[in-house]
């Protein structure tokens, strides 16, 4: 079974033991060769920043953080190599005219530069075993502006999926408000094009329009704004509207 079909049919919270296929396995330094000075010119538009629409709900699996409350931290790199990226997520409340939601818990997680996730592995979907480590996972509490900020690396990609970040938002008491995902702008001049899959390239990459999660996001509610460069680092910013 291919990973993209598994994800399409997966129900949130239904996973206990993942049915897995091969993950990307290339290795090497994230900064192979001469770092590019090319700057992102295509940033994308998240229409949640100009409207008050609840963010789409997406699957949490197949690699959700097993104990999210254990990883309250802003720097989630844990030594993983990759191009520096700052992630800024604003949480807004649709039940209060999309005013900033203070005190919300925001968990994020994503794959490393070759497409592997921590806390999983040693299976047919991801052969590299990272069950005992917890890189690229973290939790923050929104400030008075509804904002959380994470220091991480630019995600890689794996078969069947576009570049993405998973997000789970809870209220202050720990009740789930939203499980969703963040997509990245694509095309000439975009960060995805500049990073070029690290050493792996883009052959076999699944673009947003063909991705089982993002292909129906015609309003770009899940798409972030991404700026920066390999040399200076990237910054991703997005707004996620929830009903709180």
Image (cartoon, rainbow, N blue to C red):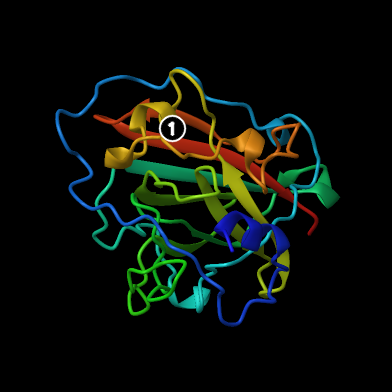
Tell me where residue 35 sits by quadrant.
Answer: top left
Q: Give the number of marks.
A: 1
Report the residue at 24% width, 51% height from top. Answer: 81
Report the residue at 37% width, 50% height from top. Answer: 151
Of the 4 image quadrants, the one containing the C terminus is bottom right
Horizontal and vertical percent position of residue 139: 49, 64
The crowd level at tag 1 (other Cα within 10 Å; few <14, some 14-19, many 20+) is many
Report the residue at 57% width, 59% height from top. Answer: 2
- Quick check: 129 left or right of 210? left
Horizontal and vertical percent position of residue 33: 14, 32
Q: Can residue 104 be seen in this view?
A: no
Tell me where residue 102 sits by quadrant.
Answer: bottom right
- Quick check: 157 left or right of 50? left
Residue closest to the eye, 168 or 202: 202
Depicted 41 relative to depicted 222: above or below:
above
Of the 4 image quadrants, the one containing the N terminus is bottom right
Residue closest to the eye, 113 or 45: 113
Depicted 180 relative to depicted 135: above or below:
above
Q: Is residue 19 visible?
A: yes
- Which residue position is annotated with label 1? 192
Depicted 231 relative to depicted 37: above or below:
below
Residue closest to the eye, 238 or 118: 118
- Quick check: 50 left or right of 34? right
């Amino acid at each position: 079974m291919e990973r993209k079909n598994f994800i399409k049919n997966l129900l949130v919270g239904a996973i206990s033991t993942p049915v897995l296929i091969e993950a990307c396995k290339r290795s090497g330094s994230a900064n192979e060769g001469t770092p590019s000075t090319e700057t992102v010119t295509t940033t994308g538009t998240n229409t949640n920043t100009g409207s008050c629409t609840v963010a789409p709900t997406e699957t949490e699996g197949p690699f959700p953080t097993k104990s999210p409350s254990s990883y309250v931290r802003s720097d989630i790199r844990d030594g993983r190599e990759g191009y520096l990226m700052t992630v800024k997520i604003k949480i807004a409340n649709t039940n209060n005219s999309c005013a900033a939601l203070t005190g919300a818990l925001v968990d994020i997680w994503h794959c490393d530069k070759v497409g592997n996730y921590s806390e999983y592995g040693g299976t047919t979907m991801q052969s590299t075993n990272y069950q005992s480590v917890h890189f690229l996972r973290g939790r923050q509490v929104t400030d008075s502006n509804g904002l959380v900020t994470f220091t991480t690396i630019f995600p890689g990609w794996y078969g069947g999926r576009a570049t993405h970040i998973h997000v789970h938002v809870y209220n202050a008491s720990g009740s789930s408000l939203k499980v969703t995902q963040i997509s990245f702008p694509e095309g000439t001049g975009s960060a995805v094009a500049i990073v070029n899959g690290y050493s792996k390239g883009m052959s076999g990459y699944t673009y947003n329009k063909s991705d089982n999660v993002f292909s129906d996001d015609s309003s770009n509610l899940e798409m972030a704004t991404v700026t920066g460069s390999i040399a200076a680092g990237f910054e991703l910013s997005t707004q996620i509207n929830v009903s709180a």
